[in-house]
Image (cartoon, grey):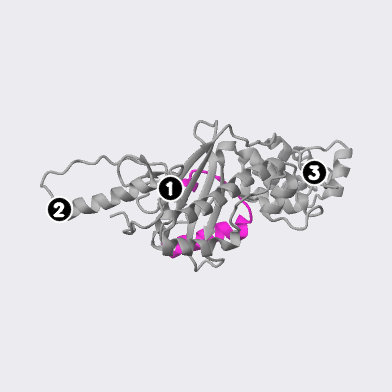
Amino acid sequence: MLGAQDYGAEEQRPSQKYMFFWRSGGEAKRVSLWDRLEGIRQQRVREARPQSDHRAEVKNTSSDAGDFCCGMELQFLLGPPDLQWPAISTDSLLHNLQLVRGVGPVYARLLSSVGKNSIADLIEIPRWQDKAALALAAVEQGDLRTLRLLGASDYELLAYFAPQDLAFIDIETIGLWMNQPLFLVGILTLAPDGDRLWIRQFWARNLAEEAEVLRAATSTLSRYPVMVSFNGKRFDLPFIEGRCLENGLVPPTPRLHIDLLYWARRSYRPFLPDCRLQTLERSVWGQVRESDIPGELIPQAYFQFLRTRDYSIIETILEHNQRDLISLVELFNRLGPAEGDESVRRPEPHCPSKQA
């Protein structure tokens, strides 16, 4: 019916703090994982009985992630939101002379010294007229593709969006290659009321449910034009694209993809031994994860869950994914200055006090 397996009575009952939203073509019901499994068993018993000619009419309602009838979806809200939006507008792009082809840092300083401070000012100079007109049109029309080709940074391009447009994403897979399935897609956004952060996690109870997880996740991502990830340009997004193609689905196509790994490297590489997410947590804002599963052990843990149906294993993986998403917001708040601008003072890494 729902693609669920007939779990044995010996499996461990999951914690009641994890509440799931059951969407099976009808209205969304907020039930615990255990209660849902009990409902599936009861439904199978009813289906085995002779059916009456008079059937109740089921009213189909659209949900936020579509008819997510296979797999599980976990949602919870965090508040108030700690998402700091940069104070930036398209005016900074209009005054970025280096968007005009042929104008580098040296020329930009020389032009500013003679009163040419905006792209519009360069249109008056025959040498730069055509190229300045191209850059000015791209800024006024919000042509992100052209602006990126002209050298605009991700930070500057955020001027065309609002906090409600961002979707932070992190995935968990059973391997590093796209011929291996994924089983969890975590998405963090602002809640519709704008007062809280909203985490949605789509995960598969078995590998056969990967397509439904992808369908629900891509349906959610399609409503957010900006994707924020950590190493997502080389892993998360290409992996999702590959698995979507494997399952006959349309992959997400964000207008802007901000990969915080590149920002972190520009900001913290001189100070830190590496720029792994948990290294940044410890060294930059002084957070140490306790009782967290290492990322490299997640595939092994998921296979153990498939064998044992021990839901405490899934809870550990879900919590790891949640922490990653929250850390992306923390990192986004700290990496505000324009990329490569060495004149901007970077925040100093957190230095734990030494014991005598």
Q: Quadrant of the N terminus?
A: bottom left
* Lower sequence index among marks 3 and 2: 2
C-alpha distance separating marks 1 and 2:
30 Å
Q: Amino acid at mark 3?
A: Arg
Give the number of callouts. Answer: 3
Q: Amino acid at mark 1?
A: Glu
Percent position of residue 207, x then y: 42, 62
Q: Which residues are magenta?
A: 220-247
Residue that carries the numbered disc 3 in the rendered image:
346
C-alpha distance separating marks 1 and 3:
38 Å
Q: Residues within 10 Å of mark 2 (few under 14, many from 20)?
A: few
Please name which of the two marks, 1 or 2, marks the residue nearer to the observer: 2
| Residue 245 horizontal side relative to residue 134, left or right | left
Q: Is residue 242 magenta?
A: yes
Residue drawn where x is 77% and y is 51% of the image: 268
Q: Amino acid at mark 2?
A: Arg
Percent position of residue 171, x then y: 54, 55
* Lower sequence index among marks 1 and 3: 1
Residue that carries the numbered disc 1 in the rendered image:
73
Residue drawn where x is 74% and y is 58% of the image: 274
Check disc 1 and report its element: helix, strand or loop. Answer: strand
Residue that carries the numbered disc 2 in the rendered image:
49
Front residue of 338 and 113: 338
